[in-house]
Amino acid sequence: MTFIMSIMLPFIIILFLLLLVLGVVSYTHLENVFGIFIPYLALAIFLMGFLYRILSWAKSPVPFRITTVCGQEKSLDWIKANRLESPFTTLDVIKRLALEVLLFRSLFRNTNTELNEGPKLIHWSAKWLWLAGLTFHWSFFIILTRHLRFFTEPVPFAIQFIDKLDNLFEIGVPALYLTDALIVAAITHLFLRRVLVPKIRYVSLPADYFPLFLLFCIIGSGMFMRHIYKVDLIKVKELALSLISFRPALPEGIGVLFYVHLFFVCLLIAYFPFSKLMHLGGVFLSPTRNLANNNRSKRHINPWNYPVKVHTYEEYEDEFREKMKAAEIPVDKE
Amino acid sequence: MSELDGVPKPEELLKIDYQPPRKGWMDTPVNFKPGTYNYPAASKNHKILELPFPREWSPMEEDWKLPENWKEIVVNGIAERLSKYRSFKVFMDICVRCGACADKCHFFLGSGDPKNMPVLRAELLRSIYRKEFTAAGKVLGKLAGGRELTPTVIKEWFYYFYQCTECRRCSVFCPYGIDTAEITMIGRELLYLLGLGINWALEPAAKCFMTGNHLGVYPHTLKDTLEFFADDIEDITGVRVEIPLNKKGADILFVTPSGDYFADPGTFTCMGYLILFHELGLNYTWSTYASEGGNFGLFTSHEMIKRLNAKIYAEAKRLGVKWILGGECGHMWRVIHQYMDTMNGPADFLQEPVSPITGTKFENAKSTKMVHIMEFTADLIKHNKLKLDPSRNDKLKVTFHDSCNPARAMGIFEEPRYVIRNVCKEFYDMPENTIKEKTFCCAGGAGLGNDENMEMRLRGGLPRGNAVKYVQEKHGVNRLACMCAIDRATLVPLCDYWAPGVQVTGIHEMVANALVLKGEKERETDLRGEPLKELEE
């Protein structure tokens, strides 16, 4: 798989889909399909797929407690244990996972190693990936949250507040959301490093570019709708409310760009459970992160532990008895 | 330096090209270059352990004499492990190929071979998983990141799953905690299903199974060896230490890796244990049957871990001891800490460990009932139970290598440092990104510490060697302390190559040098028989 193929294939697929939606919505009257049927279908696939994946992972047991320990163990009283990096109790584990999921603790450790003359191998702290990753995920989350204003009437205060906060700087009319700017910057960084850093490019699969392009389309169409080619937001909200109350009704004339946006969102969530995006669920199930480092104090049970063939002491002594006796090593049977 | 014969000079080795080739990795076949791979396991060792398809074969030959239904065996093997290990299943699915792990692997840093990036090492197996077990992979093949399982893939696995020391450094940096050691361990299990293993791991496993230790030391030879140490100790200190062997009614069973009583400089550490236990008047015993703390099963298969580890509890039960004390070893402690109790416990016939000297309860070991000697000794020093004269180590400027397994499986960071600081005056840690949880491997663990693989070991040893060289140049460090028997064997050529002039030591060697014994004579030499002070020139 060459780089060109890895990147072009998803690009062509996305481009094809983009033209397809634009064409179909502009020249036919299949808005019902794109506005009602596909969203319900995608949501169903997402929910069932997500649940299926989690259950299928959960079905496999965790035979051994293989925590990756990143801090001082709890041993002697006078040595301060690092309970976040070497959790001892379930509460510690929850804290460790929270730090991982909310702040990307492990990525924060990232270094970049350089071989210089000397030779000197230097391990620089490298926080860009952490920063871009964190910015992307948090922006995505906030954007998702403020979209809830379309699904609620009246809009709860918390959502209004987030919306307001995101709009704090009031740049332009309508104002540019802070998270919109941030997510574009972050995802551009993530895309560029994948394309420009040779070793990352080398390991990248079409499945790595596809979600990136998908996100570019979603973010692009969303921002385009807000700032340039405006759609009727009242009608969008009408549709959203009708969808969520399971009484779907499609208002006329929302604007074609909305359908592009919605279609790619549907594609993303339907694709989600079958892709690497499942790291969202997987991180919680990762045995190196979600187990306490208390192995010697609390026995871990392996549900499929089975008896194995061993070389018993009796067999051993039978073989070496004479030699042991000659060397005056105690034996069980004289 | 004979071990280093035939290895390119450092200047040569340092011409590392981190630029991946133009061709995609799936289209780049593996190249078995002498010095960078391990010799296959002899069929006799497969037979001793009753492993399938014993045969003589060579990686250099085209035909590896795979069993007829090899493909079916591998696919079924993967299916079985997906259903038994959540780790494996989750790690097959969730990697986003962010590349954070790429330059965390010592073998990648030392070789530039992209397939030594942990992400790609895992993709070697993941691509087969996709092709055989996911709908997208079955239908779309390469486009979905899948590839056909061919004998070439098996060869690639053999090469790269034995260019991983299962050190788990990558899993510290992975945002999802993907642990390449899990993937390598399962990859090696799959290879063993086809009768493919390496001799340097399987022979010790076979010997350990039969004689109780990796080196195949017989009971009487073990006794002779320990007596010999006692003689040396008497010469140096004037004190005769006893050698309790297979003693029923002892309070404590002591288990340590056989490397400690087999070769320098491990032997000096072994003498250190003998001296310490004698001075404490500890009621303990060695065992000839459980004469191995290490466990090369860890480098073979999960089942082999259990088969070799079983004798520790069995022997503790037979001898009727109260608890078990474990010596300075790396992978042994991964097994003791993360596997033993689960596999061969519960150890309900033992008591919760309590230090007979200080009364300290080792509550962190109350289920497994096995205490790390560094916890034990740190506790002794803290309670002022040892009379120490650190000036006897004055010629040493010490740094400490955190061994991968005690670091990332246990988190035992401060205990060894506390002990070292109390037995010598000059201690300097290596740079922060190369110690503790971020420690770099000796590149000879997980069965790779053999001579035929020396070039790869030294390549992988670059990051560790370079950090040693840093403190050597900055602080004049001349001694690299470690608490791992494999380290004591592998760091020696590593230092000779990357940081000449630095010698390797176990921690209890330094402890015993500093330990003032009741009734000892004035010491003139250290345990190595070398003068205590540097001779004035």
Image (spheres, grey):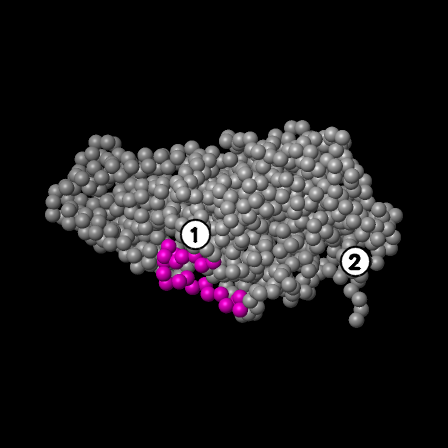
Q: Which of these two is toward me, A293 or A132?
A: A293
Give amino acid for label 1: Asp
Q: Is residue B210 magenta?
A: no
Q: Evaluate if marks 1 and 2 touch, with contact meaning CB atoms under 8 Å apart.
A: no
* Cα–Cα gap, marks 1 and 2: 52 Å
Name the image quarter holding residue B374.
Answer: top right
Visible residue check, residue B164: no
Q: Which of these two is toward me, B305 or B276?
A: B305
Q: Who comes first in sequence, dot 1 or dot 2? A: 1
Give amino acid for label 2: Gly
Q: Chain of mark 1?
A: B
What segment carries the magenta color? B12-32
Q: In x, y percent, where is residue B216?
A: 66, 45
Q: Residue at x 67, y 62 (%)?
A: B502
Q: In x, y percent, where is residue B296?
A: 59, 45
Residue located beneath label 2 in the image: B529
Q: Quadrant where the N terminus of chain B lies?
A: bottom right
Q: In x, y percent, where is residue B404?
A: 58, 50
Q: Residue at x 59, y 46 (%)?
A: B203
Q: Is residue B191 left or right of residue B441?
A: left
Visible residue check, residue B458: yes
Neighbour tally class for label 2: few under 14, some 14-19, many 20 plus, Cα within 10 Å: few
Helix, strand or loop for the magenta stretch, by majority: loop
Q: Are marks 1 and 2 on the same chain?
A: yes
Residue located beneath label 1 in the image: B63
Q: Is residue B44 above or below residue B526?
A: above
Q: In x, y percent, where is residue B402?
A: 62, 52
Q: Residue at x 43, y 55 (%)?
A: B62
